[in-house]
Amino acid sequence: MKNQRGFTIAELIIVIIIAGVLAAIAAPNMSEFVKNNSRANRVNTMVSALNYARGQAVTRNTRVSLCKSAAFANCDAAGTGDFGTGWIVFIDGNTRGIVDGVAPNNDTVLRIFQPDMGNNATLTGVKNVVSITMAGLSYENTGLGLDLNAAAGDTVVSPNTVFRYCDDRGAAEARGIVITPTGYPRLTRDTNGDGTDDIGGTNLVCP
C-alpha cells in the first residue's frame, strides 16, 4: 500500500504566493475587458436606437424623435444632455419635440431604452432631442424640431450632432457617435493617431 502525503506548509505558501501573483497580473486585464465590453454595449444601444428611429421615420413617413427621459413617459427638460438615465423614441407628428396628445398627430412612445450605466460612466448628447424625418435629421436644444429641408421659417442648426460616452478612464477611452445629416449614426475614430478619438481633428473631451 502506497503512502499518501499532503502538501507541506512550505508548499502551500509557495502555491498561495504564485496564485496571488497570477491574480495580480490578471486583475487589471479583466477590469479592462469588463469596461471595454460595457462601453461597447452602451454605445451600440444608442446606435441601435438611432437606427430604429430613422427606420420608423421612413416607414411611417413622419417625424420620429429621440430624447432623454428618466420617467420614460415624456422628454426631460433641457439641461445637461445626460442620457445616462435612459431615453425614448417616439412619434413626433406635431414636431413639438415632446410627447403630447395634441391633435391631429397624437404622439406615441415607440420604444424605451434604459442602459445599465456603471464605472462612473456617462452618455451625453450635445442636444437633448434628436428628430429624424424622411428628409434627414434635425436638432434643437429646447426640443422644437427643425426640418433639414429648411421649410418656411425653419433653420438648419447643425450638419451633425454627437453623443459622447465616457467612463472613469477618461478621454483616452472615450467614444463618440456622430449622426450625419441623413440620419445615419457612425462611430468616431482616432484620425490623427494621438490615441484619442476625435471629430475633424478635435479630440473628445470627458468631464
Image (cartoon, rainbow, N blue to C red):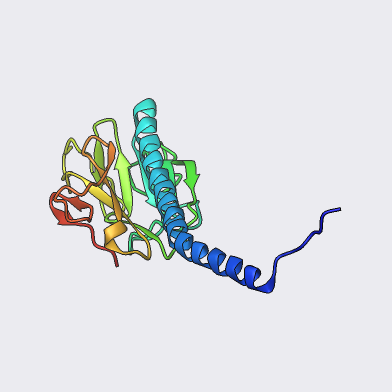
What quarter of the picture does the C terminus occupy? bottom left
Residue 91: in sight, yes or no? no
For the residue pair 17 and 92, the one nearer the viewer reads as: 17
- In-front residue for pair 80/65: 80
Q: At 40% across and 47% down in the image, what residue appears?
A: 40
Number of disc labels: 0
Image location of residue 23, percent across then percent down: 52, 63
The residue that appears at 19% across and 52% down in the rendered structure is 198
Q: What residue is at 23 percent from the left and 52 percent from the top?
A: 197
Q: From this viewpoint, which residue is outermost toward the front?
A: 1
Q: Position of residue 115 (x, y in %)?
A: 48, 52
As drawn, the residue found furthest toward the right would be 1
Q: Is 152 situated above or below 158?
A: above
* Image position, residue 88 (x, y; %): 44, 47
Can residue 143 be seen by looking at this rendering?
A: yes
Query: Which of the 4 image quadrants contains residue 52?
Result: top left
Which is more toward the observer, 201 or 29?
29
Which of 179/79 is in front?
A: 179
Q: Is residue 193 above or below residue 48?
A: below
Residue 167 horizontal/vertical position (percent)? 37, 61
Question: Residue at the top extreme?
Answer: 59
